[in-house]
Image (cartoon, rainbow, N blue to C red):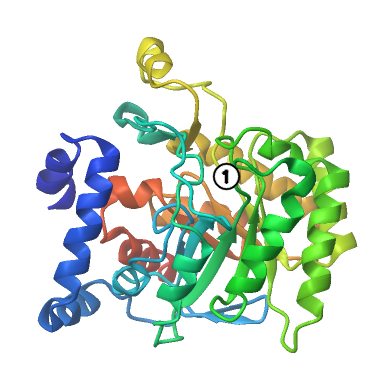
């Protein structure tokens, strides 16, 4: 029903406009007790898919990746669609508008998106106020943190610390995002020296807490094997909990969409089916290089149970979806979970 009727209608409007419309619609619908109850009964998977990863209990291994609910406006309602965990953000210390519109584009022929959102968000304080209203702790919430566009890289650590300290009491784990291609020079923080400094500083602050929380690093799919080797070394050296692989890609190779249409969309990261193979390749390399020393959350081109199983077979412990959720609709989470139970 979603792909036959609703998706064609939604895809007839601009992606960002539809995103805001969908948020408002879900918020209103889920405020009605009957709708909320019916949604949970229809979409929350039955059966035991619980996982224990980096000390946290996940009701199932399928999560929603950062970027969909940046400001934590819909985490409760989205939980009714069966997600085992939801990642909010990327959030920055101060509110910022992000890059100029249009900045989000569909590539239906590739089942992909191009985005150059630029960490648009209402700031960490607004997110904290919403998370304070969190009542049910059964759904794991992750906090994806970044730096403001105006903050130079040499002062980036300060931005990440602000977000970490303010969010600490309100999320279950943290993700350090230095891999978005849409904030100028951000990916330079993936270099070994600045990245080690950033993660070591955050981990030091983390270990000062009575109950430290898992800190993960989200990496780009465009890293070389030497850079991936550095990442594995940095995880070991800093003692962070694990990795999320991978963010969007700046590559345009292998797309079915006509080149002129892709060029018209312009700069940004590609997500969806085109990044699936590379994401799996990165996960497999990291697992082979690191053994079982840390968990990996997989994201990139997951639309089906087979896609999710591919990532798990490559060495991931959990998976996240984003573009697949937009193309497949809310029933995809239950379908993936049901498929995983049968494998």
Image location (x, y in percent) of residue 237: 90, 61
- Residue shown at 29% from the left, 72% from the top: 77
Image location (x, y in percent) of residue 39: 20, 74
| Nearer to the camera, 229 or 341 | 229
Tell me how many marks there are: 1
- Residue shown at 30% from the left, 31% from the top: 108
The local secondary structure at tag 1 comes to loop
Residue 225, relative to residue 43: is it above or below? Answer: above
| Nearer to the camera, 19 or 272 | 19
Q: Which residue is mark 1?
A: 247
| Nearer to the camera, 297 or 310 | 297
Q: Is residue 262 visible?
A: yes
User: In this rendering, would 281 be left or right of 98?
Assistant: right
Image location (x, y in percent) of residue 138: 44, 85
- Image-quadrant location for residue 171: bottom right
* Residue at the top extreme, as displayed: 260
- Residue shown at 72% from the left, 87% from the top: 211
| Nearer to the camera, 332 or 192 | 192
Residue 318, relative to residue 30: is it above or below? Answer: above
- Image-quadrant location for residue 31: bottom left
User: In this rendering, would 56 be left or right of 98?
Assistant: right
Q: Residues within 10 Å of mark 1 (few under 14, many from 20)?
A: many
Image location (x, y in percent) of residue 185: 68, 34
Q: Is residue 292 visible?
A: no
């Amino acid at each position: 029903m979603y792909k036959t009727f609703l998706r064609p209608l939604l895809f007839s409007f601009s992606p960002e406009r539809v995103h805001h419309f969908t948020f408002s619609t879900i918020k209103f619908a889920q405020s009605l007790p009957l709708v909320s109850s019916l949604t949970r009964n229809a979409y929350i998977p039955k059966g035991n898919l619980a996982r224990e990863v980096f000390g946290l209990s996940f009701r199932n291994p399928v999560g929603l990746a950062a970027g969909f609910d940046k400001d934590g406006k819909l985490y409760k309602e989205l939980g009714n669609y069966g997600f085992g965990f939801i990642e909010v953000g990327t959030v920055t210390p101060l509110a910022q508008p992000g890059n100029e519109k249009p900045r989000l584009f569909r590539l239906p022929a590739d089942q992909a998106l191009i985005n150059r959102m630029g960490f648009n968000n209402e700031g960490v304080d607004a997110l904290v106020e919403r998370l304070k209203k969190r009542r049910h702790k059964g759904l794991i919430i992750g906090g994806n943190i970044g730096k403001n566009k105006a903050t130079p890289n040499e002062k980036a650590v300060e931005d990440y610390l602000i977000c970490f300290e303010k969010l600490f009491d309100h999320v279950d784990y943290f993700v350090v995002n230095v891999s978005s291609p849409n904030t100028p020079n951000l990916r330079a923080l993936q270099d070994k020296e600045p990245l080690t400094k950033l993660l070591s500083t955050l981990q030091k602050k983390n270990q000062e807490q009575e109950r430290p929380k898992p800190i993960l690093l989200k990496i780009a799919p465009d890293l070389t094997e030497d850079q991936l080797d550095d990442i594995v070394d940095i995880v070991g050296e800093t003692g962070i909990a694990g990795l999320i692989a991978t963010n969007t890609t700046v590559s345009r190779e292998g797309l079915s969409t006509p080149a002129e249409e892709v060029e018209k969309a312009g700069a940004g990261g590609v997500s969806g089916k085109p990044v699936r193979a590379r994401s799996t390749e990165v996960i497999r390399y990291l697992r082979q290089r690191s053994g079982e020393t840390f968990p990996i959350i997989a994201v990139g081109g997951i639309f089906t149970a087979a896609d999710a199983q591919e990532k798990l077979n490559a060495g991931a412990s959990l998976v996240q979806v984003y573009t697949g959720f937009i193309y497949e609709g809310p029933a995809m989470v239950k379908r993936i979970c049901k498929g995983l139970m049968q494998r």
